[in-house]
Amino acid sequence: LDLRDNPGGYMPAGLDVAKLFLPPKARIISEIDKTGRSRIYINEGIGSDTETPLYILVNKQTASASEIVTAALKDNHRATIVGTTTFGKGKIQNVQPLDNGSAIAVTKARYMTPNGNDINGVGITPDKESTTCSASDSVDACLSGIV
């Protein structure tokens, strides 16, 4: 999966992508609200492909829902992460439009990886560091010597 320069998007989309590659009952993330209550997201279905070896390419611009996918597959030993440390957006936000046409992002909760790591402001450290792989390089070039 090439998630370089992928800013993520909506949390449910990240959950859905992770489910494609995880076995049933695998933990995806835990959402912690402002009161400290935790909601655990588990793969309730059967992933489309739970056995093919996976590599995920990431960089500093990999964020949000893309980090949910990355963390879920890394912590469940489902993928090898290659690249540089990700952005570190471990918060779940809702965008609220304002009357003047602008909008405000309201933080609803934070999330923890399946292993209980808070990535906010820290990011996800790759399994294989690759500082020579830029977003314009091909997947083959980035994985050369790794796969």
Image (cartoon, rainbow, N blue to C red):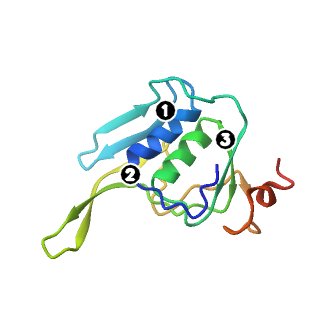
Could you classify mark 1 by the number of other residues whose Cα lies within 10 Å: few (under 14), some (14-19), or many (20 or more)?
many
| Residue 10 percent coordinates (x, y) | 38, 51
Indicate which label's residue lies in the foreground, 1 or 3: 3
Indicate which label's residue lies in the foreground, 2 or 3: 2
Residue at x-position 23% and y-position 69%: 103
Q: Is residue 115 visible?
A: no
Q: CA distance from mark 1 to mark 2?
A: 18 Å
Q: Is residue 144 visible?
A: yes
Secondary structure beneath label 2? loop
| Residue sitting nearer the eye, 10 or 63 | 10
Secondary structure beneath label 1? strand
* Callout 3 amino acid: Ala
* Callout 2 amino acid: Tyr
Tell me if 38 is positioned left or right of 118 in this view: left
Which residue appears farthest toward the right when viewing the image?
145
Residue at x-position 52% and y-position 61%: 122
* Callout 1 amino acid: Arg
| Residue sitting nearer the eye, 120 or 87 | 87
Which residue appears farthest toward the bottom when viewing the image?
100
Could you classify mark 3 by the number of other residues whose Cα lies within 10 Å: few (under 14), some (14-19), or many (20 or more)?
many
Residue named by callout 3 = 79
Residue named by callout 1 = 27
Q: Please report whichever mark, 2 or 3, sits nearer to the chain's N-terminal start.
A: 2
| Residue 22 percent coordinates (x, y) | 57, 31
Tell me if 22 is positioned left or right of 54 in this view: left
Residue named by callout 2 = 10
In the figure, 98 relative to 78: above or below?
A: below
| Residue 13 percent coordinates (x, y) | 43, 45
* CB under 8 Å between discs 1 and 2: no
In the figure, 8 relative to 48: above or below?
A: below
Residue at x-position 74% and y-position 67%: 131
